Image (cartoon, rainbow, N blue to C red):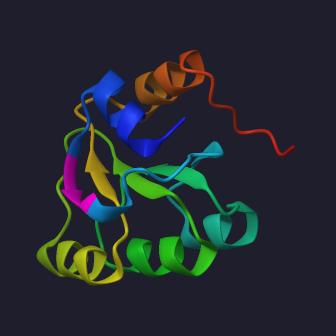
Amino acid sequence: MTLAEIIDRLGLQVRAGDAALRRDVERGYASDLMSDVIANGLEGDLWITLQTHQNTVAVASMKGLAGIVLVNSREPEPDTLEKARRESIPLLVSELPAFELIGRLHGLGLTGLRA
């Protein structure tokens, strides 16, 4: 499933990375700890977090993640938004809490399990 399809089905708001929305999403990963995502996130994962600072973009870029979704209507900090735009990292916002968003992503067929 592409990131664009997920955005459409779940009503996510795009804040950055418009050019990369046709990317396939392999799995989902949820964590608010940078070290956890560095250790366990996989290329193609869609990262669900409440962290709004620019280090999220650095981690997403380093790991080759499909994008970042901020939950609970959290907005990225200005420097985060700028960095995401520069690095073409999709940065999305959901009004849903993490638990609900993850459930809906699973309902669309995404899993967090490694192949």
Compared to residue 58, the image places residue 101 above or below, namely above
Q: Is residue 74 left or right of residue 40?
A: left
Q: Is residue 17 visible in the rendered structure shown here?
A: no
The secondary structure that most of the magenta stretch takes on is: strand
Image quarter hosting the C terminus: top right
Residue 56 appears at what percent x and percent y? 42, 71
Image quarter hosting the N terminus: top right
Q: Residue at x 24, y 75 (%)?
A: 85
Q: Is residue 43 left or right of residue 75?
A: right
Q: Foreground residue, 31 or 85?
A: 85
Residue 42 appears at what percent x and percent y? 70, 61
Q: Residue at x 56, y 15 (%)?
A: 107
Compared to residue 28, the image places residue 17 above or below, namely below
Q: Foreground residue, 22 or 42?
A: 22
Residue 73 appears at what percent x and percent y? 19, 41
Furthest residue in direction top, as rendered = 107
Residue 13 appears at what percent x and percent y? 19, 42
Q: Which residues are magenta?
A: 14-18
Q: Is residue 87 left or right of residue 94?
A: right
Compared to residue 7, the image places residue 53 above or below, namely below
Furthest residue in direction left, as rendered = 78
Residue 15 on the magenta segment: yes
